[in-house]
């Protein structure tokens, strides 16, 4: 009888348990949350969603998507760019009314996807970070409730699939590592008549 070394047995058991449980770090499901020190990573590893604090910040945090494999953090989308988080216990979660929300320790909302009429999320509801950098809240694998690409900020990514009546919000180009507080301006770049970029 052949006896396997312990490290091989541990590897095989770990691999099998991951396959059986179907765990993934690219998604958030109802009842789960992401805290300030946790992230979602797209399936191919290209993008990360998480909380970050600009280098010169006085304790403000932002929730956003950035490239994973670029040494200097390159942020492509920020959820709460108008309202920084100043509570280190804030979390991102799927709320009881199927919204993607960032809440503080007392349940106060810093940011919300602002959906209405969807009711309690089903077991197949998930927030998923796609390989394109798009953060998507979906009711199942085919029903998208909300997506970050419908709310673009100031950064183009390859193939964002923006279709008609969307606008890039031209904000000051932000060096997120050195930003203090972000303010907006009124410049917009839009797409009309279902044209594609």
Image (cartoon, rainbow, N blue to C red):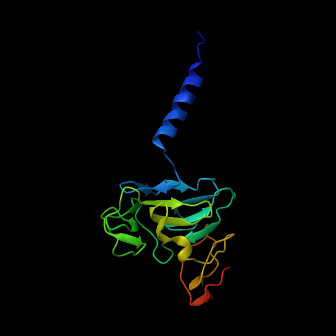
In the picture, which quadrant includes the N terminus? top right
Point 59% across, 17% down: residue: 4
Question: How far from the left and from the top, in percent, is residue 71?
Answer: 69, 57
The answer to which of 74 and 47 lies nearer the viewer is 47
Q: Is residue 103 left or right of residue 48?
A: left
Q: Is residue 67 left or right of residue 61?
A: right
Residue 59 appearing in the image: no
* Corner quadrant of residue 106: bottom left
- Above-or-below relation of 192 to 2: below
The answer to which of 136 and 52 lies nearer the viewer is 136
- Above-or-below relation of 117 to 32: below
The answer to which of 119 and 108 lies nearer the viewer is 119
- Above-or-below relation of 28 to 57: above
- Total marks shown come to 0
Question: How far from the left and from the top, in percent, is residue 2?
Answer: 60, 12
Question: How far from the left and from the top, in percent, is residue 127?
Answer: 47, 61
In the picture, which quadrant includes the C terminus? bottom right
């Amino acid at each position: 009888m052949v006896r396997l070394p312990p490290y091989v047995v541990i590897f095989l058991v770990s691999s099998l348990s991951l396959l059986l449980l179907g765990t993934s770090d690219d998604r958030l499901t109802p009842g789960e949350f992401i805290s300030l020190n946790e992230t979602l990573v797209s399936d191919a590893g290209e993008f990360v969603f998480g909380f970050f604090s600009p280098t010169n910040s006085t304790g403000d945090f932002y929730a956003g998507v950035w490239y994973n494999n670029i040494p200097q953090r390159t942020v492509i989308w920020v959820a709460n760019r108008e309202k920084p988080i100043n509570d280190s216990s804030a979390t991102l979660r799927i709320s009881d009314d199927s919204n993607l929300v960032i809440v503080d320790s007392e349940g106060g909302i810093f940011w919300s996807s602002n959906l209405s009429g969807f009711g309690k999320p089903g077991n197949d509801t998930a927030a998923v970070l796609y390989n394109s950098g798009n953060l998507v809240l979906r009711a199942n694998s085919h029903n998208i409730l909300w997506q970050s690409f419908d709310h673009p900020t100031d950064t183009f990514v390859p193939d964002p699939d923006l279709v008609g009546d969307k606008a890039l919000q031209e904000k000051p180009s932000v060096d997120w590592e050195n930003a203090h507080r972000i303010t907006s301006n009124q410049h917009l770049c839009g797409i009309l008549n279902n044209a594609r970029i």
